[in-house]
Image (tube, helix red, strand yellow):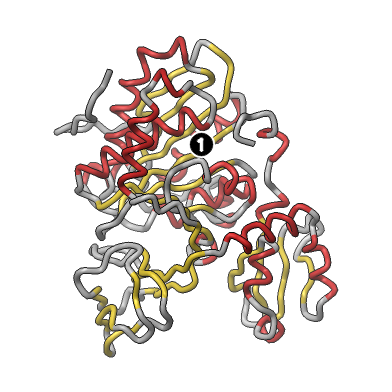
Amino acid sequence: MHKTPAKLDLPIYQRVIGQIEGALPGPTLIFVGGIHGNEPSGVIALQNAIAEIQPLKKQLKGKVIALAGNIGALQQGLRYRDIDLNRQFTREKMKSLQTKHTEESNEIEEQRELFNTIEQILETETGPFYFFDLHTTSGETIPFLTVNDSLLNRKFTKQYPLPIVLGIEEYLEGPLLSYINELGYVAFGFEAGQHTSEKSLQNHFSFVMLSLVYTGCMVPKSIGFKKYYQQLSNAVHKNFIFYEIIYRHEVSIKMKFKMNPGFENFQRIRKKEVLAIQTGGVIKAPQSGRIFMPLYQGKGNDGFFIIQKIPILFLWISKWVRNIQLDRLLVLLPGVRWKTHMREELLVNRKVARFLAKDLFHLLGYRSKKWDHTHFVMKNRERTSRKKEYMKTRWY
């Protein structure tokens, strides 16, 4: 057995890191590492995991596929070369991939190849499908999950001994997994630790092993489940809490931004506490909470986020009201209407939105984005969730 994931000195990056088809039918797992090129830990962990699983393929149910995200940026050790690849998976940008322009950014070429690979997997393999996006952070952190807020995602991810952060889709435009979620599949991100930490590599490896068990690909005893479970549990100090993002500080390209040193993920902060220095003065916390993903790298426009704990009662009530589709009553409110006949999105007048509690929409499964100068568009993942495809699984 592979005791400790070994660090590879000279990793060779290719789109398909590896794939293993089990002797028995089962789900298809798609892992993506290195969609940001300065985060090679996920790719190396996947290389190690494929080597670990290969001798066990007779015990494996289904198929495991490991993909590399931004190959060119990985080779240069950069977050990205021209544009952030993990902000390009919007509906509009996905449509434009069908036409190749003579002058394209490096990342658009990467996106087209990655998307075509994923599309081919969905067309040729059998489900249920699970997507996992492996990341690291610029600042120190315990490992955690970032999850688009659907009941399907919540139900699956609560198996992990990790903190779960909901609502990132409301603040980021175009992540790969938000697009996958809109297709209805289980898809979420795992942040293993700081970019260069050896612990991040170990956490990534443990996460992959646990995912094999939670999806039903492997039985616990065949991979040493307890060891990997305990490693992640100890790393987070038994912090198995649901959190929600309540604020994002965006950094403009024209601004000089520097995060004050010493902040770690999930660290408590007070309202008006000085967090960073930016062109024009200091940046203070607009409210109390916990700091989340403070920016300690050269590239990126997410200065920091603030999160807060979600009460268990709120999670229970939101599950109940979504299951009975209480959101259908929202269109009875003035200034609220369906955006399309599919009833996946709401258009909400911005003046009306000021008088409606944001928590109400979150409770019902809606997350808002600016639509135009008069309206917000609010998306609901529950309408597109492929629940029927997962109903026969052990975890469901």
Question: Count of labels shown?
Answer: 1
Say which residue appears at 66% left-offset and 64% top-offset.
366
Q: Is 206 situated left or right of 325 in this image? A: left
The percent coordinates of residue 119 (x first, y second) are: 56, 35
Say which residue appears at 28% left-offset and 47% top-offset.
39
Q: Pick the quarter of the image with the C terminus.
A: top right
The percent coordinates of residue 93 (x first, y second) are: 53, 55
Q: Is 208 situated left or right of 323 in this image? A: left
Looking at the image, the residue that sits furthest to the bottom is: 280
| Residue that mark 1 sits on | 116
Q: Is 101 situated left or right of 149 in this image? A: left
Helix, strand or loop at mark 1: helix
* Residue type at numbered disc 1: Asn
Whether 202 is drawn above or below 380: the answer is above
Q: Quadrant of residue 227?
A: top left
The percent coordinates of residue 337 (x first, y second) are: 79, 71
